Image (cartoon, helix red, strand yellow):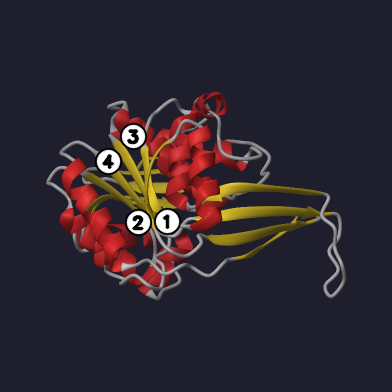
Amino acid sequence: MIYTLTLNPALDYFLSFESFAEGNLNIPKETYKLPGGKGINVSKILKNYNTDSICLGFVGGFTGIFIEESLKADNIKTKFFKIKEDTRINIKINNHGIESEIAGTSPTIDTESINDLLEYLKNNLKKGDILSLSGSVPNSLPTSIYADIIESLPNGVKVVLDTRGEPFEAALKKGVFLIKPNQDEINEFFKANFSTNEELINAGKKLQAMGAKNVLISLGAKGSIFISDSSTYIAGVPKGELISSNGSGDSMIGGFIYGLDNNLDLENCYKYGIASGSATAFSKGLAKFETTQTLLKEIEIKNI
């Protein structure tokens, strides 16, 4: 089974304007709401690829109800742990093509709820399962939370980690199957300004030495790098019109996990990751399987 965990989900409220005048009354031309969060996006991608997962996280209040009911309407399995405060709301504004975001304040997650999550993971996950740990950590939780989760897991669970800062470093030291930093996150982690592929590959290998079995480095329009324990691959991106990069990184993880679930070798898992991330970038919303399959044929990977 595949599990995704979002510690800090949100109700994402999208507003689109022809023009936005600060200090005045503004009426959007379009609004809509979606359940948001990196792990939630991974589960959505997998469902688009006809692959089941169980979406884990903490939700509360009317916003939490919206998230849970929306995912169930999409036939995505959930196991959410209830908290007393409302799940946060993120506001995403598109002002004539210029995107801005206001991130809501994270709710408090009580000790009982986090203990319930750890107990669930300990009792339900088993060897061969995949657990995607994605996104930021609420301020009410220790920065070691992802590391604590990894320690609670049975042996043989494949952990995919996509976060940054102290939670990333603490979890990395516990050993993970795959990490997916982007170029900015690598430079932030090493307090550096790596720009060449050679520098980024060396940084990726340092991350392997710290605990990552595989390293997938996303470089946006410049492509990506994938470092396994035996090979290093580099690839560009397929041709297409960028509509929105929102969710592309999560889609890349979803595509890679899809490959793992279908027992593909790592090179082809990497290809699915690239195609999936690109399909989302070229779409309104998250990638559909048909688009991903089409782009898959255009991807060329170089073993260096």
Residue on which the image places disc 3:
267
Residue on which the image places disc 1:
197
Residue drawn where x is 51% and y is 27% of the image: 289
Please identify the residue farthest to the left as the structure is shown: 155
How far apart in space, not on screen, are marks 3 and 1 (Cα)? 18 Å
Image: 277 above or below 146: above
Residue on which the image places disc 2:
201
Measured as percent of width and height from the top left, residue 48 is found at 50, 30
Asked where in the image residue 113 lies, by quadrant, the reply is bottom left
Give the left or right position of residue 94, taking residue 200 as reference. Answer: right
Q: Residues within 10 Å of mark 2 (few under 14, many from 20)?
A: many
Q: Are marks 1 and 2 in contact (CB under 8 Å)?
A: yes
Measured as percent of width and height from the top left, residue 19 is found at 86, 60
Residue on which the image places disc 4:
130
Give the left or right position of residue 61, taking residue 207 as reference. Answer: right
How far apart in space, not on screen, are marks 4 and 3 (Cα)? 18 Å
Measured as percent of width and height from the top left, residue 18 is found at 86, 54
Q: Of the residues under marks 4 and 2, which one precedes in the sequence?
A: 4
